[in-house]
Image (cartoon, helix red, strand yellow):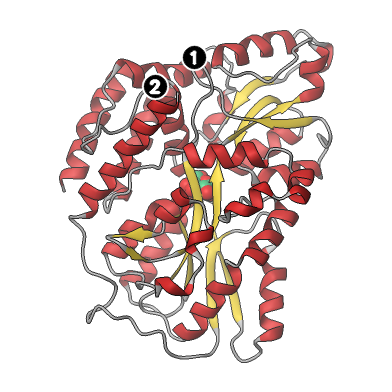
């Protein structure tokens, strides 16, 4: 398992290096971005479903009355966020100051000089988890500071598993469907479905596809960064998802699910198992399933699966004003103290290694050590400048296979061709 994971991680790292080399400059024309100007700024991120961001901004604003930050909330859908940020960058607008970038966009935004290269020494990168730090770099430079990490976890109904006589969470897909079959015989499981993830046609689908492929021993690219999805292993991964849709293990409506839809379904008792990110933990603890669920590592084909590496990094828009304030604000939001608060209040996975080993925090979130391992072993999505093309090809072909429009084999052959074209651009 470990060796295979290492090889896969290396394959993606190699992809990053190879393709990143095709990218552009180092941040600004003279290569030395200056962070000058103080005054009001904006913070631009996806909709805050946790309700904890504005209170943190209020604290900043109280302490910095002349450098207030206004929160601009974009849609929850990662692709829609990316589009709006690109539009802002292409029109060289100063409306957005600090951007909360999905970890997969750093190379693209840095290569296009939409974000500034940051003074690396200013931030405590040495205290952060290494794979997380990697997501904030491009061609050796720091372009963003991690504010959160993310690893996929399997949420499951402890009460129902126990009643059905299942004593431990499933480590494989087979164990998961077997456990479901037992649970569904219980009268209280009437009308429930077995499993869901994020299967709407957006970034979440790319995440779930990559996890299925990796969890079946496949990979998205080989060690040289060449796409490698037309393989029996990748087929086993995609087949698991396609078959699960076909036989009802995954309910049909999950084809429209983003993170929040799955969370609502799990919280209202419609699902036995759900793949989701850590943020859901604290919200579910305040819902009808409080005390009736736990989390486990993602299952795989023959043993534990592997997660995609998620998370967000804070960057300074190249066309923004008041960049001195922007840097201070990034320092504030990404500090160990404040990421601890986001963890305590909203179970947001922090970038700092030490928080995963903290006794008090483990008392609150018993899964933290497992999550740390899962983040350390997580497979990054391709770190490519052409990320938009790569992810839309993955989404299109995966969606076709899940809908039954194409066989997994056909979808993977077509995806292989499209990915080759995308990375050659
Ligand atoms: C989460 C992850 C991010 C991922 C997105 C997909 O926000 O942190 O990396 O791309 O979900 O929906």
The residue that appears at 56% across and 17% down in the rendered structure is 172
Residue 258: x and y in percent read: 56, 41
Q: Relative to 395, is 327 above or below? A: below
Which residue carries the number 2 mark? 217
The Cα–Cα distance between marks 2 and 1, rounded to whole angstroms, is 9 Å
Cβ atoms under marks 2 and 1 closer than 8 Å = yes
Q: Is residue 365 visible?
A: yes
Query: On the rendered structure, is 25 left or right of 260?
Result: left
Q: Is residue 204 visible?
A: no
Quarter of the image holding residue 83? Answer: bottom left
Q: Secondary structure at mark 1?
A: loop
Quarter of the image holding residue 151? Answer: top right
First-in-chain label (2 vs 1): 2
Which residue carries the number 1 mark? 302
Query: On the rendered structure, is 104 left or right of 265?
Result: left
Residue 264: x and y in percent read: 70, 39
The residue that appears at 53% across and 81% down in the rendered structure is 41
Query: On the rendered structure, is 172 left or right of 377?
Result: right
Q: Relative to 147, is 420 above or below? A: above
In the depicted view, which residue is nearer to us: 252 or 385?
385
The residue that appears at 62% across and 36% down in the rendered structure is 370
Residue 139: x and y in percent read: 27, 60
Q: Secondary structure at mark 2?
A: loop
Residue 337: x and y in percent read: 67, 66
Q: Relative to 34, is 303 above or below? A: above
Q: Residues within 10 Å of mark 2 (few under 14, many from 20)?
A: many
Q: Residues within 10 Å of mark 1 (few under 14, many from 20)?
A: some
Disc on res. 58? none
- Which quarter of the rendering shows the N terminus? top left
């Amino acid at each position: 398992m470990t060796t295979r994971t290492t090889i896969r991680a290396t394959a993606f790292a190699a992809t990053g290096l190879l393709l990143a080399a095709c990218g552009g400059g180092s941040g600004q024309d003279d290569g030395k971005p200056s962070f000058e100007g103080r005054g009001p700024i904006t913070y631009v991120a996806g909709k805050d479903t946790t309700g904890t961001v504005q209170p943190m901004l209020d604290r900043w604003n109280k302490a910095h009355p002349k450098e207030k930050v206004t929160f601009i909330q974009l849609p929850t859908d990662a692709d829609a966020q990316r589009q709006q940020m690109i539009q802002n960058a292409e029109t060289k607008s100063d409306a957005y100051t600090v951007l909360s970038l999905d970890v997969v966009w750093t190379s693209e935004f840095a290569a296009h000089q939409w974000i500034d290269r940051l003074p690396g020494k200013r931030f405590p990168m040495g205290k952060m988890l290494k794979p997380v730090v990697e997501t904030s770099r491009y061609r050796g430079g720091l372009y963003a500071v991690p504010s959160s990490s993310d690893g996929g976890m399997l949420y499951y109904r402890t009460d129902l598993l126990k009643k059905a006589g299942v004593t431990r969470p499933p480590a494989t897909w087979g164990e998961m469907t077997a456990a479901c079959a037992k649970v569904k015989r219980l009268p209280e499981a009437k009308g429930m479905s077995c499993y869901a993830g994020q299967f709407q046609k957006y970034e979440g689908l790319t995440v779930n596809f990559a996890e299925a492929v990796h969890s079946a021993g496949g990979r998205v690219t080989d060690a040289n960064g060449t796409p490698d999805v037309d393989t029996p292993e990748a087929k086993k991964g995609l087949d698991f998802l396609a078959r699960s849709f076909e036989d009802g293990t995954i309910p049909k409506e999950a084809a429209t699910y983003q993170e929040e839809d799955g969370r609502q379904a799990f919280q209202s008792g419609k699902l036995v198992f759900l793949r989701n990110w850590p943020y859901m933990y604290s919200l579910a603890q305040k819902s009808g399933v409080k005390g009736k669920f736990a989390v486990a590592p993602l299952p795989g084909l023959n043993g534990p699966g592997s997660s995609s590496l998620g998370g967000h990094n804070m960057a300074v828009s190249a066309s923004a004003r008041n960049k001195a304030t922007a840097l201070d604000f990034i320092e504030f939001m990404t500090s160990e103290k404040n990421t601890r608060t986001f963890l305590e209040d909203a179970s947001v996975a922090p970038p700092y290694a030490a928080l995963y080993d903290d006794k008090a925090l483990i008392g609150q979130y018993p899964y933290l050590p497992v999550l740390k391992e899962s983040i350390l072993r997580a497979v990054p999505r391709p770190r490519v400048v052409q990320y938009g093309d790569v992810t839309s090809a993955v989404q299109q072909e995966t969606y076709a296979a899940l809908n039954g429009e194409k066989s997994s084999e056909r979808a993977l052959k077509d995806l292989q061709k499209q990915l080759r074209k995308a990375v050659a651009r």
